[in-house]
Amino acid sequence: MKAKTTMRLRFPPILFLLLTLPMLAIAASARPIYANFYVATNGSDAWNGLLPSPNANRSDGPFATLQRAVEASRKINRSQENFAGINIYLRGGNYLLSQSITLTKLTDGFTLISNYKDEHPRLIGGRELREWKLVKDEAVLSRMDASCRGKVY
């Protein structure tokens, strides 16, 4: 009588890793989006920020400031135990930041801040200086090159 033989396939551990790591990376990057918030120069921080443009009767639309969008995303992040992710889209235009914005893994999780489609937002920080005055102090002017005098504020 002939003995039965069984074949066992043996996968080296490195082969197993090579086959499974790409699948894990794809699964991790394919997170569902819980919310999209929008910020626009014609927005209002009193609105819900869920529309990319103001609606027809201007009763709802994008937020006006990035600070307000981050605040709204943090409320969702804290309320969701298994939250997916939040996108904050900035429409084109200039946004003056009155304070710095800090995002942390603990409070902001998977929050992505990006431009909206092909638009070009600009975040501007610092303080605007006004009421510049022409330098008239002779002690200061005497140290300047003659070509600069009358042109320095």
Image: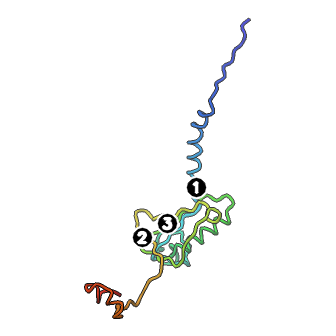
The amino acid sitting under disc 1 is: Pro
Label 3 neighbour load within 10 Å: few <14, some 14-19, many 20+: many
Looking at the picture, does residue 90 appear above or below residue 32? below
Looking at the picture, does residue 78 appear above or below residue 145? above
- The front one of 107 and 52 is 107
User: Which residue corresponds to mark 2?
Assistant: 92
Label 3: element kind: strand
Relative side of 133 to 97, left or right? left
The amino acid sitting under disc 2 is: Gly
Label 1 close to label 2 by CB (< 8 Å): no
Label 2 close to label 3 by CB (< 8 Å): no
Q: Residue 100: name its quadrant.
A: bottom right
Residue 89's label in the rendered image is 3
Q: Earlier in the sequence, mark 1 or mark 3?
A: 1
Q: Gap between marks 1 and 3, in whole Å? A: 16 Å
User: Which residue corresponds to mark 1?
Assistant: 32
Looking at the picture, does residue 16 appear above or below residue 107? above
Point out residue 46 in the picture as x, y percentages from the top left corner: 56, 79
Label 2: element kind: loop
Q: Gap between marks 2 and 3, in whole Å? A: 10 Å
Q: Earlier in the sequence, mark 1 or mark 2?
A: 1
Label 2 neighbour load within 10 Å: few <14, some 14-19, many 20+: some
